[in-house]
Image: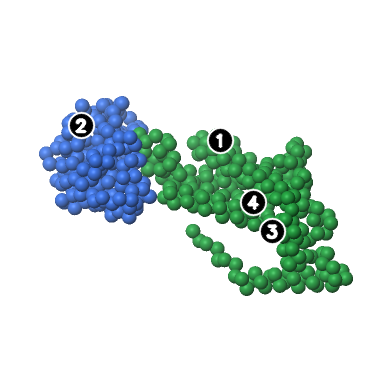
Amino acid sequence: MKRQRPVRLWAAAFWLLVWEGASLALASTTGGRMLLLASPVQALGRLLALAATAEFWQAVAFSSLRILGGFFLSCVLAVALAALAARLRWVRELLSPLVAVVKAVPVVSFIILALIFFSSENLSLLISALMVFPPVYLNVLEGIGHTDRQLLEMARVFRVPLSRQLRGIYLPAVLPYFRSAVSLGLGLCWKSGAAAEVIGLPEGSIGEALYTAKVYFQTGDLFAWTAVIVTISVLFERLFLRLVDAAVRKAGG
Amino acid sequence: MEIGVRNLCKSFGDQAVLRDLSFTAGPGITCVMAPSGSGKTTLLRILLGLERPDSGTVEGLTGRRISAVFQEDRLLEHLSAEGNLRFALGREYDAKTARALLDRLDLPDTGAQPVREFSGGMKRRLALARALLAPFDVLLLDEPFTGLDQENRARALAAIRETAGVRPVLLVTHDTADAEGAPVVRL
């Protein structure tokens, strides 16, 4: 698998300096107060200050639970439906327009529609699940489609039970497809989940904190919370992909 | 026990692969010989239940356990030799019996080495071992000696004869030496 080149320290330092410069330039237009654009140092300071409060961790737990819950629920549903769709043509045909619509419609439309019918508290769970479903479903379906037919025939001749076929034939074929879907889906679920919280404003969520930061021009808080979202997203993605990679290696795919 | 093939016909599009084929395979080895592309593999696929004939019948296979060597090795490349045998045999796998047969086929103990690292001949012998170790009433072998030298070919043929005993074996080959007095069906 092709690994992305790591971000070079000098390049990161350059862009941090650009940010600092932009912050100072904007501050000079507001009498030296960094109102419009907090500097990197200010953002870091806010992050550390926020991290010292219980509310911060409660918000992290609230949003993570729902966004990752949506991710896991969606994965389970997508894998189950992909398995069914691979076997039953009518299921595949039935789901095809639904998946196409979810892929094409802007996430904000779903968020607003969902707010009409559901409470905002679990909105991010629903939205992140919705965004993760198409890539996982389509990739797993493709993986099943690429399963070696000759091996399946061999298993049939030797009367190998389905459970062993799943472990020995299907899993090694599907796991690499599942991995790339998960990599894409994890980024999507955090972006869409946070957007849903900013619009739905569930109490005690990261989204609400982002919205409050916007209302009060607290750009330091805005950057701090953004950094939190990115960090949790990246950490979870790495952890989860490591688990999937271990499974891929074990299955031999 | 016999396998009866009666008036078997099979076409793919406009191309007739099997034309009114009839024969009976009794106990022991029956060789199926024919040039490439003459429907040997299609015949075995029909007998394995993987292909439906356009017309004709097959008798003597209903309810019978069939074991086979396919034209391709059809091994799980990521698994070891033992992993492949365990996959196909499940609870029927017995390490001692398997080792004895693998030794007989001159396949050394390769431990956890995945099959993808095996030579073509090793893979073929493992595919044959899998077929011989699986419980069967009928054995269907599609060119099982491909890639084997004369010595290993002779070992494999002896192992087939001994393991199958009086159970019917259909051996697809294009080497007349494999027939060795066995009845021959020519397509």
At horizontal 28% and vertical 51% (from top left) the residue drawn is B110
The residue labelled by disc 2 is B167
Mark 4 lies on residue: A188
Cβ atoms under marks 2 and 4 closer than 8 Å? no
Residue at the disc numbered 3: A227
Whole-percent x, y for residue B166 in the image: 17, 31
Does residue A154 show up? no
Q: Amino acid at mark 4?
A: Leu
Q: What color was chain B assigned in the picture?
A: blue
Chain that is coloured green in the picture = A
Q: In the rendered view, does A150 fall on the left or right side of B5? A: right
Q: Amino acid at mark 2?
A: Arg
**Residues at marks 2 and 4 on the same chain:** no
Between A91 and B51, the one lying in front of the other is: A91
Q: Nearer the viewer, mark 2 or mark 1?
A: 2
Cα distance between the residues tagged 3 and 4: 16 Å
Q: Chain of mark 4?
A: A
Chain identity of mark 2: B
Q: Residue at x 64, y 54 (%)?
A: A232
Question: SS for tag 1?
Answer: helix
Q: Residue at x 54, y 38 (%)?
A: A80
**Three-letter residue code for mark 1:** Val
